[in-house]
Image (cartoon, grey):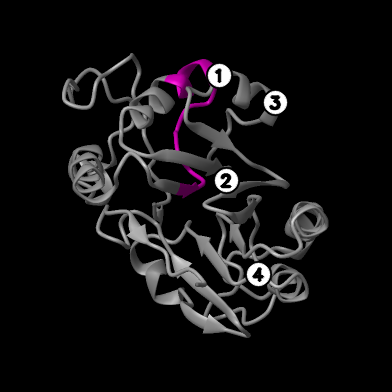
């Protein structure tokens, strides 16, 4: 039983489809081929199936579906359901359908979880999650518009970690963020401070694509292992996470 991660699936099916029954011309509302992700859902499907077993768990930190409404996102959730393993998902900046985690949870197929400002247990480990946000000093930071959201998202991570530590003080802690907790341009953040304070061992994140991959920070940083899992960065194949023994 292993834990994998892959983010930014950016699916956009407009009807119920099976893994091998997708008409690219009619069933996909927002093809990612324009970004060089040629038939990327097929690449995800094939590499997921060759990697993940039914007994494994896959973490998906945000930007799962392009859908604007929850009823549309259900087609993408159902496609993911057909892939092997249990799935734990958290929101990204394009998850516009996820205005209420209660409503998202109500429509999720069996074997799939949604966490946001809270946590779940995976393979005897705590997995906490929230969206994250742009970081002060980074390329896209705007003090007037971003500060409040940034601090709110940090508060949501704190809520999740406080509850996790209170309920399960002896379990390893993993965090799912959509936005990176640090970048090459922004070397510190409230998210990193919180993860250090609450003894997080591993953080997976996404959001960075194409040329932005060069801004990614990975490896051990202040005792926390950071891993970028945007699907284009990891060649559309779920990556096995390094866990504590």
Residue 8 at x, y percent in the picture: 42, 48
Distance (Cα) linking label 3 and label 2: 18 Å
Residue 223 at x, y percent in the picture: 61, 83
Circles 4, 1 touching at the beta carbon (< 8 Å): no
Looking at the image, is mark 1 or mark 2 earlier in the sequence?
2
Crowding near the residue tagged with mark 4, few <14, some 14–19, many ≥20 C-alpha atoms within 10 Å: many
Q: Pointer 2: what residue?
A: 93
The residue mark sitting in front, 3 or 2, is 3
User: In what element is the residue under mark 2?
Assistant: loop
- Quadrant for residue 232, please give it: bottom left
Determine whether, in the image, residue 71 is placed left or right of residue 36: right
Give the magenta range.
59-74
Looking at the image, is mark 3 or mark 2 earlier in the sequence?
2
User: In what element is the residue under mark 1?
Assistant: helix
Crowding near the residue tagged with mark 2, few <14, some 14–19, many ≥20 C-alpha atoms within 10 Å: some
Residue 18 at x, y percent in the picture: 24, 20
Q: Which mark is residue 107?
A: 1
Q: In this view, does 145 lie above or below 143?
A: above
Q: Residue 72: within the magenta?
A: yes
Circles 3, 4 touching at the beta carbon (< 8 Å): no
Q: Pointer 3: what residue?
A: 102
Q: Which mark is residue 200?
A: 4
Distance (Cα) linking label 2 and label 4: 23 Å
Distance (Cα) linking label 4 and label 1: 30 Å
């Amino acid at each position: 039983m292993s834990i994998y991660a892959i983010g930014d699936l950016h699916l956009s099916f407009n009807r119920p489809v099976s893994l091998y029954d997708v008409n690219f011309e009619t069933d996909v509302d927002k093809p990612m081929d324009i970004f060089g992700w040629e038939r990327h859902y097929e690449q995800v499907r094939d590499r997921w199936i060759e990697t993940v077993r039914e007994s494994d768990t896959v973490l998906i930190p945000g930007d799962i579906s392009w859908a604007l409404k929850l009823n549309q996102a259900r087609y993408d959730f159902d496609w993911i359901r057909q892939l092997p393993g249990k799935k734990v998902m958290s929101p990204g900046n394009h998850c516009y359908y996820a205005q209420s985690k209660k409503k998202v949870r109500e429509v999720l197929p069996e074997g799939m979880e949604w966490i946001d400002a809270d946590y779940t247990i995976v393979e005897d480990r705590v997995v906490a999650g929230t969206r994250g946000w742009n970081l002060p000093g980074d390329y896209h930071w705007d003090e007037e518009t971003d500060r409040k959201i940034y601090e709110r998202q940090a508060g949501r991570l704190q809520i999740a970690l406080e509850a996790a530590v209170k309920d399960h003080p002896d379990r390893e802690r993993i965090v799912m963020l959509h936005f990176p907790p640090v970048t090459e341009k922004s070397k510190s953040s409230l998210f990193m401070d919180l993860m250090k304070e609450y003894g997080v061992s591993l953080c997976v994140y996404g959001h960075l694509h194409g040329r932005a991959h060069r801004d990614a920070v990975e490896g051990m940083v202040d005792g926390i292992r950071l891993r970028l899992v945007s699907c284009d960065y990891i060649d559309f194949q779920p990556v096995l996470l390094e866990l504590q023994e």
